[in-house]
């Protein structure tokens, strides 16, 4: 089961396309630079961590809701 769920993430970012591009970009930065925005993550994978940052509001995305 994905945490956070797609439904919850779409309340933060209104487009699946935008969600994918933002989370993939952030996951690459996490992998290369290892600069987390949160202290604790539920996911061990970079994409999961990126999605958690988006959902929690730790990662601000311009031009969304």
Image (spheres, grey):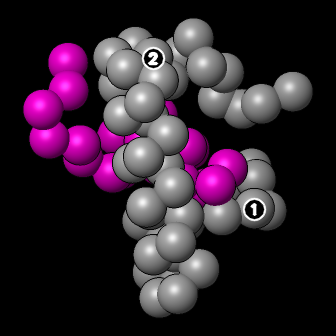
Report the quarter where the N terminus lies. Answer: top right
Tag 1 near tag 2, CB within 8 Å: no
- 21 horizontally vs 50: left or right: left
Q: Residue furthest front?
A: 17
Q: Disc number at residue 45?
A: 1
Element type at marker 2? helix
**In the rendering, at what x and y percent does residue 30 appear?**
52, 74
Residue 48 is inside the magenta segment? yes
**In the rendering, at what x and y percent does residue 18 appear?**
36, 34
Q: Quadrant of residue 65?
A: top left
Q: Which residue is mark 2?
A: 10
Note whether 27 is above or below 42 in the view shown: below
Instruction: Looking at the picture, tell me which residue is in the foreground, 42 or 11.
Output: 11
Note whether 32 is above or below 21 in the view shown: below
- 11 horizontally vs 39: left or right: left
Note whether 40 is above or below 4 in the view shown: below
Q: Which residues are magenta?
A: 47-65
Q: Going 53% across and 16% down the picture, which residue do you hit? A: 8
Q: Going 47% across and 88% down the picture, which residue do you hit? A: 33
**In the rendering, at what x and y percent does residue 31 appear?**
59, 80
Q: Going 44% across and 62% down the picture, which residue do you hit? A: 26
Element type at marker 1? loop
* Mark nearer the N terminus (1 vs 2): 2
Q: Is residue 65 visible?
A: yes
Rounded to the nearest angstrom, the CA distance separating label 1 from label 2 is 20 Å
Q: Quadrant of residue 19?
A: top left
Q: Disc number at residue 57?
A: none
Q: Going 42% across and 46% down the picture, which residue do you hit? A: 21
Q: Residue furthest left?
A: 63
């Amino acid at each position: 089961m994905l945490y956070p769920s797609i439904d919850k993430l779409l309340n933060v970012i209104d487009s699946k396309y935008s969600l994918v591009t933002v989370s993939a970009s952030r996951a690459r930065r996490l992998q290369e630079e290892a600069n987390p925005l949160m202290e604790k993550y539920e996911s061990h994978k970079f994409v999961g961590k990126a999605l958690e940052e988006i959902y929690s509001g730790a990662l601000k995305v311009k031009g969304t809701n």
